[in-house]
Amino acid sequence: MEGWFTTSEPYSLIGAKCTDCGTYVFPPRSGACPNPSCDSMELAPVPLSRKGKVWSYTENHYAPPPPYVAADPFEPYALAAVELAEEGLVILGQVAKGVMGADLEIGMDVEVDLEVLYRDADGVDHWIWTWAPSAPEASA
């Protein structure tokens, strides 16, 4: 595993998990466990849950200043803080294109997806993870 997310389907974020107490962190890193009651110095990379629930959300209507890169032309987008049920982490990320704050609600089911943030002058696509509304599950 490399980076903050997988690039093949099904997409997932990559975090790290303490090998002693099971505490999760995102983004992935090495070093000491963040749990103050754990003395472990080993965090192992792990895929995180693909799905979670919207914990909070907002909209961004301003392009980020340099050195950050935004799509050109800039289009407003929603941001969501999503709680992963299995890990208990709350992870902030952009919401899928076309989904704005009016389309979101607290507790809404979302899942990890990937989108192109921008294409550079050399034609290389730069990807980000997004939170996309989950498709309703078919009943058996």
Image (cartoon, grey):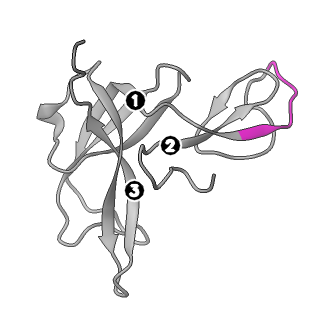
Q: What separation in Å lies between label 2 and label 1 (alpha carbons)?
A: 10 Å
Mark 3 or mark 1, which has the lower sequence index? 1
- Secondary structure of the residue carrying tag 1 is strand
Q: Amino acid at mark 3?
A: Ile
Residue located at (22% from left, 43% from top): 59
Disc 3, disc 1: CB below 8 Å? no
Q: Which residue is mark 1?
A: 51
Is residue 103 rendered magenta in the image?
A: no
Q: Which residue is mark 2?
A: 13
Q: Determine the residue located farthest toward the left in the rendered image.
A: 102
Mark 2 or mark 1, which has the lower sequence index? 2
Q: Estimate the x, y position of residue 115 in percent, counting from the top left.
A: 31, 56
Q: What separation in Å lies between label 3 and label 1 (alpha carbons)?
A: 16 Å
Discs 3/1, front: 1
Q: Estimate the x, y position of residue 22 in percent, counting from the top left.
A: 72, 23
29, above or below 69, in the image:
above
The span picked out in magenta is 37-44
Residue located at (54% from left, 34% from top): 48
Q: In the depicted view, which residue is nearer to us: 83 or 6?
A: 6
Q: Which residue is mark 3?
A: 128
Examine the image and state in which quarter residue 107 appears.
Answer: top left
